[in-house]
Image (cartoon, rainbow, N blue to C red):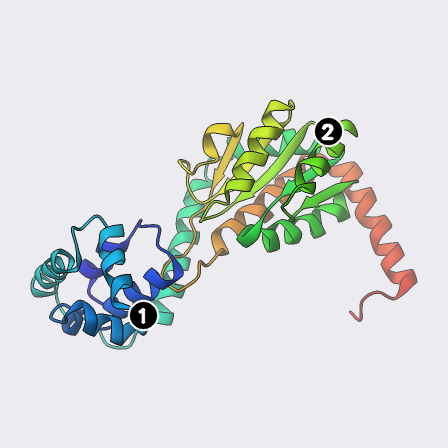
Amino acid sequence: MNEGVVKIFQGARLTPTQRRIAHCLVEHDSKAAYLSAAEVAELAGVSQPSVTRFAMALGYSGYPALRRELRAVTADEPAEPAGQNAMQRAVHAETEHLRRLGEQLDRLEDVRAAAELLIASRPLPVLGLRAAAPLAAYFGYFAAKAFPDVRVLDGGGTSLLDRLDQARAAGAGAMLAIVLPRYPRETVEAVREAKAAGLAVVAITDSAVSPVAESADVVLPAAVGTQLVFDLHTGPMAMAMVLLQAMCDAAPEPVQRRLEEFEATAAQRHIFLA
């Protein structure tokens, strides 16, 4: 892998089609630097206009300008080392994200502040739409074992704000919002509505400067992987579980009681095989 080519795309928010193009250029860096836009399009399996839009999304005037940059970096840097394919590089990038997250957790003040806000909320709404919906459901599934009345808000539409209003009327004082690229407009608007209604907001998102950051009381950033066609959410999932651990640590006695009650019920009903 030519690191210079990878750096051209790092930090850019790209559509799945644009990621296919970036993946193709990284995979065939020395060759792609001398191909036309039409040839890159054929190699990546996309349209030629998509290649042009891709170059412009990276800040270039067009594909010729991007190609000049590709030629410069492939001429200056050594060839890709043997033994790593694109899938391995994506996974290795995730291990780097987790390493950085581990360093970030050297300071737990924000995580503990978020935990205190959330454990005081009855009910506890957990917002996650589109790509964030599975993570909201994952967090909600385990949180409900330790805390009463966890409400996962994973569907948009006209009922979303109704459900948020219902949670507030029932006594909710805080909300966890999981907000991942490409940042659904509906999610950001729901967070603003929650703030306007008086809820404190804890946000798990990919960056401290994501669109939801300005509306959140506590931001817990965790980078997402961007080297495949679709994002890898390993970091945000780890952050969600770290947050849930901090919530359990902040209320050990009631959490332990609820967990014991659940285990007794699970055994009585033969829910699990092991």
Q: Which residue is mark 1?
A: 46
Q: If the image is split into quadrants, where does the C terminus sit?
A: bottom right
| The quadrant where residue 120 appears | top right
For residue 212, side relative to residue 159 (left or right) = left
Q: Residues within 10 Å of mark 1 (few under 14, many from 20)?
A: some
Q: Residues within 10 Å of mark 2 (few under 14, many from 20)?
A: many
Asked whether 37 or 138 is in front, the reply is: 37
Q: Which residue is mark 2?
A: 168
Q: Nearer the viewer, mark 2 or mark 1?
A: 1
Which x, y percent locates residue 207? Answer: 41, 41
Which x, y percent locates residue 169? Answer: 77, 27
Report whether residue 112 is seen. Answer: no
Report whether residue 210 is seen. Answer: yes
Q: Are marks 2 and 1 in contact (CB under 8 Å)?
A: no
Q: SS class of the residue under badge 2? A: helix
For residue 8, side relative to residue 166 (left or right) = left
Asked whether 257 or 36 is in front, the reply is: 36
Image: 211 above or below 78 = above
**Badge 2 or badge 1: first in the primary sequence:** 1
Residue at point 70% right, 51% down? 142
Asked whether 85 or 187 is in front, the reply is: 187
Residue at point 27% right, 51% down? 57
Image: 90 above or below 7 = below
Which x, y percent locates residue 52? Answer: 23, 59
Asked whether 238 or 224 is in front, the reply is: 224
Tell me which amino acid carries mark 2: Arg
C-alpha gap between disc 2 and disc 1: 47 Å
The residue most toward the right is 268
Tell me which amino acid carries mark 1: Val
Residue at point 88% right, 66% down? 270
